[in-house]
Structures are given as structure tokens and as C-alpha cells.
Image (spheres, rainbow, N blue to C red):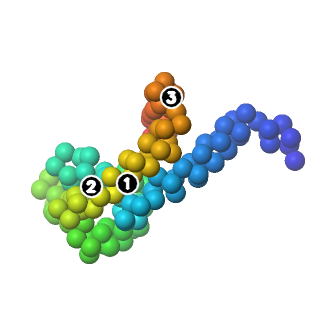
């Protein structure tokens, strides 16, 4: 084994990132009342003007393959959380639209989620640490888009 690579600072940094995420994720997703993948979809729609996105754009935003996202959307539509409307700009495409029931589910989930975020993610950090973390995460996201 290559001891130098095993102890490389970048490997350690990535390991710490993965460990922190693994420990925080279940805590901040606790008590959502819906699967976290559904929450992510509802949150994306809720934060988008008009509360609708093209299905393909939404699938990409939540890191799903189109087939996997279609199955997820089918389940969410069956539960009445979203609906699919034709895209008036492109007859071949469909829009995922947040329903009133989906908005209510999102409000319920956000109440628990924000509380957990404040306790487990933001709480241990100073205001300056939070600003640095946000800047770092945006840099990583944008550099790897």
C-alpha cells in the first residue's frame, strides 16, 4: 500500500467531509414526514418562481436519472404532491408542478428540517464559520457543475 497516498491531506479532507455528511444527514432528515428524496423535489419546486420546473431540469437538479426520476414523480403524483402539466413552450416536455397538498407537506417538513439544521448543522458553527462553509460549498458546486 502507498502510505503517502493513504495519509494524503486531500484524502483526509474528503474523508472528513463524507463523515460529517453521513452523521448530519440522518439527523437533519429526521421527522420530515416524507422520504428525503420527495422533500428535495418539493423544496426545489417550492423555491422556484411559479412552483414548477421542467421534469428534465428537476431530475437533473436532484441528481436522478430521467428513468429514476420518472418513477419518483409517479409516486409523488399518485400521492397528490405534484402534478404534471404540458410545457407550453415545448409540447414534447412536461412540467412538474407543486400542488396545494405538496405545499402543505413541504411546510410540515420544513418546520422539522429547519429545527434540525439549526441544532446539528448551523448550531455548532460560528457566524463566520457558516459564511466560510457557504462560500466553500458554492465554490465546490460551481467548479464541478
- For the question of whether residue 33 can be seen, the reply is yes
In the image, residue 76 sits, relative to residue 61, either above or below, namely below
Q: At 46% across and 52% down in the image, what residue appears?
A: 28
Please tell me how many numbered marks the rendered image carries. Answer: 3
* Alpha carbons under labels 1 and 2: distance apart: 9 Å
Q: Earlier in the sequence, mark 1 or mark 2?
A: 2
Q: Which residue is mark 1?
A: 112
Residue 138 vs residue 94: left or right? right
In the image, residue 141 sits, relative to residue 84, either above or below, namely above
x and y, in percent, of residue 137 in the image: 49, 35
Element assignment for label 2? helix
x and y, in percent, of residue 102 in the image: 24, 62
In the image, residue 59 sits, relative to residue 50, either above or below, namely below
Q: At 21% across and 54% down in the image, what residue appears?
A: 52
**Quadrant position of residue 56:** bottom left
Contact between labelled residues 3 and 1, with CB atoms less than 8 Å apart: no
Element assignment for label 1? helix
Q: In this rendered view, identify the residue nearer to me: 29 or 60.
A: 29
Element assignment for label 3? loop
Q: Residues within 10 Å of mark 3 (few under 14, many from 20)?
A: few
**Quadrant position of residue 104:** bottom left
Q: Which residue is mark 2?
A: 107
Q: At 86% across and 43% down in the image, what residue appears?
A: 2
Q: At 20% across and 65% down in the image, what residue appears?
A: 101
* Alpha carbons under labels 1 and 3: distance apart: 22 Å
x and y, in percent, of residue 94 in the image: 21, 62
Q: Residues within 10 Å of mark 2 (few under 14, many from 20)?
A: some
Q: Which residue is mark 3?
A: 126
Q: In this rendered view, identify the residue nearer to me: 57 or 27.
A: 27
Amino acid at each position: 500500500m502507498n502510505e503517502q497516498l493513504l495519509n494524503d491531506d486531500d484524502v483526509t479532507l474528503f474523508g472528513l467531509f463524507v463523515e460529517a455528511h453521513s452523521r448530519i444527514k440522518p439527523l437533519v432528515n429526521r421527522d420530515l414526514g416524507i422520504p428525503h428524496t420527495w422533500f428535495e423535489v418539493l423544496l426545489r419546486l417550492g423555491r422556484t418562481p411559479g412552483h414548477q420546473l421542467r421534469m428534465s431540469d428537476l431530475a437533473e437538479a436532484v441528481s436522478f436519472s430521467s428513468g429514476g426520476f420518472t418513477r419518483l414523480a409517479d409516486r409523488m403524483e399518485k400521492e397528490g404532491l405534484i402534478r404534471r402539466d404540458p410545457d407550453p413552450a415545448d409540447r414534447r416536455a412536461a412540467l412538474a408542478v407543486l400542488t396545494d397538498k405538496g405545499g402543505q407537506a413541504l411546510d410540515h417538513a420544513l418546520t422539522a428540517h429547519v429545527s434540525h439544521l439549526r441544532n446539528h448543522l448551523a448550531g455548532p458553527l460560528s457566524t463566520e464559520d457558516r459564511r466560510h462553509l457557504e462560500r466553500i460549498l458554492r465554490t465546490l458546486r460551481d467548479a464541478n457543475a
